[in-house]
Amino acid sequence: MSPEMLGTVGPIVVMIAIFYFLLYRPQKKQQKQRMSMLDSLKKGDKVVTIGGIYGTIEALSDKSLKLKVADRVVIEVARASINAVLTEETEAK
């Protein structure tokens, strides 16, 4: 490789490496954590949806779940719409 070619290709390689370590890798890690959270949902978990609805899981299926939001009020939401599982620590905040 000639020095001129290295001067042209070098910055491109550096930009690709920066893109990988600052954008792609953290996003993949976050996506993996979200998928494991969605896979570990179980009946009785207190959750919050992406839309901000708080409730308790009453029933689960592959694509959706039934969420109890109040006495005698159960709604069906997509499993992917769950944003977080609430623990006693997060509820206290």
Image (cartoon, helix red, strand yellow):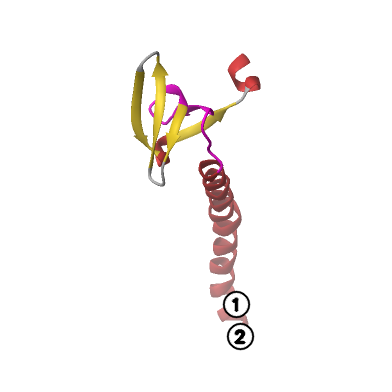
Residue 1 in the magenta stretch? The answer is: no
Vertical comparison of 32 with 47: above or below: below
User: Which residue is label 2 attached to?
Assistant: 2
| Residue 61, x across and y down, in percent | 41, 43
Quarter of the image that includes the N terminus: bottom right
**Viewer-nearest residue: 49 or 66:** 66
- Can you tell which quarter of the image residue 88 is in? top right
**Residue 52 seen in the current view:** no
Q: State the residue at coordinates (60%, 77%).
A: 6
- Can you tell which quarter of the image residue 16 is in? bottom right
Residue 51 in the magenta stretch? The answer is: yes
| Residue 8, x across and y down, in percent | 54, 74
- Can you tell which quarter of the image residue 93 is in? top right
**Residue 20 seen in the current view:** yes
Residue type beneath disc 1:
Leu
Vertical comparison of 60 with 58: above or below: below
| Residue 44, x across and y down, in percent | 53, 28
Q: Which residues are magenta?
A: 40-56
**Viewer-nearest residue: 39 or 89:** 39
- Between the C-alphas of marks 1 and 2, the distance is 6 Å
The local crowd at label 2, few if under 14, some if 14 to 19, many if 20 or more residues have their Cα within 10 Å, is few
User: Which residue is label 1 attached to?
Assistant: 6
Say whether residue 41 is left or right of residue 52: right
Residue type beneath disc 2:
Ser
Say whether residue 10 is left or right of residue 74: right
